[in-house]
Image: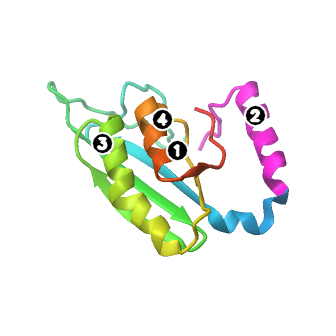
Amino acid sequence: MARILPLSKIHISKRLQLSRNHMSYGDKWMAVIFSDEKKRNFDGPDGNIKYWYDLRKEHRSFFSWQLGGGSVMAWAAFGFNGQVGLTILDGRQNSPKCMETLENHLIPFAENIGRRNWKYQHDNAPILTSNATKNYLKSKNLLLFFSGHR
């Protein structure tokens, strides 16, 4: 496979600095919960013309249905003490749906950890950085650990 990372030099520099800043975090990592979501299309890439392929084999063609083939969005979270089961999200996601996912899946998981001072890390997706979601997170006493770079 051809190995090319789609990261700019700025992204690489920021990620390296983020890692260096948290190398000595030690046991505090046990109180961090990470989450992420991923959309998958049923009929191939989402407007992206680049994809991984084995250089020893012929390229595969992606066919698109005239009205679109649909997609599925999955969400999950994990921490030192376990993981939230994979959750299939319904429809296009927005801030209210995001808060519903956090309320129904992340909060119960965090409460089962038994700590009160756990921290939440996310990737700065717009639905997680909206004012409504920020206020929701604040109301639940979720301390934002650090955010990934989008």
Question: Mark 4 or mark 1, which is nearer to you?
Answer: 4
Dot 4 or dot 2: first in sequence order is 2
| Residue 66 in the image, given as x and y percentages of width and height | 15, 24
* Cβ–Cβ under 8 Å for marks 4 and 3: no
Report helix, strand or loop for mark 3: helix
Please name the amino acid that badge 1 sits on: Asp
Q: Residue at x 42, y 60 (%)?
A: 107
Please name the amino acid that badge 2 sits on: Lys
> Which of 32 and 71 lies nearest the eye of the viewer?
32
> Which of 129 and 16 lies nearest the eye of the viewer?
129
| Residue 79 in the image, given as x and y percentages of width and height | 57, 65
Q: Could you give the CA–CA distance between mark 4 and mark 3, rounded to whole angstroms? A: 30 Å
**Residue 14, numbered circle:** 2
* Cβ–Cβ under 8 Å for marks 3 and 2: no
Q: Which residue is mark 1?
A: 54
Question: Mark 3 or mark 2, which is nearer to you?
Answer: 3
Left or right: 39 as drawn, with respect to 14: left
> In what quadrant of the picture does the C terminus appear?
top right
Q: Residues within 10 Å of mark 2 (few under 14, many from 20)?
A: some
Please determine whether, in this image, residue 112 is positioned above or below residue 59: below
Magenta residues, as a range? Answer: 1-23
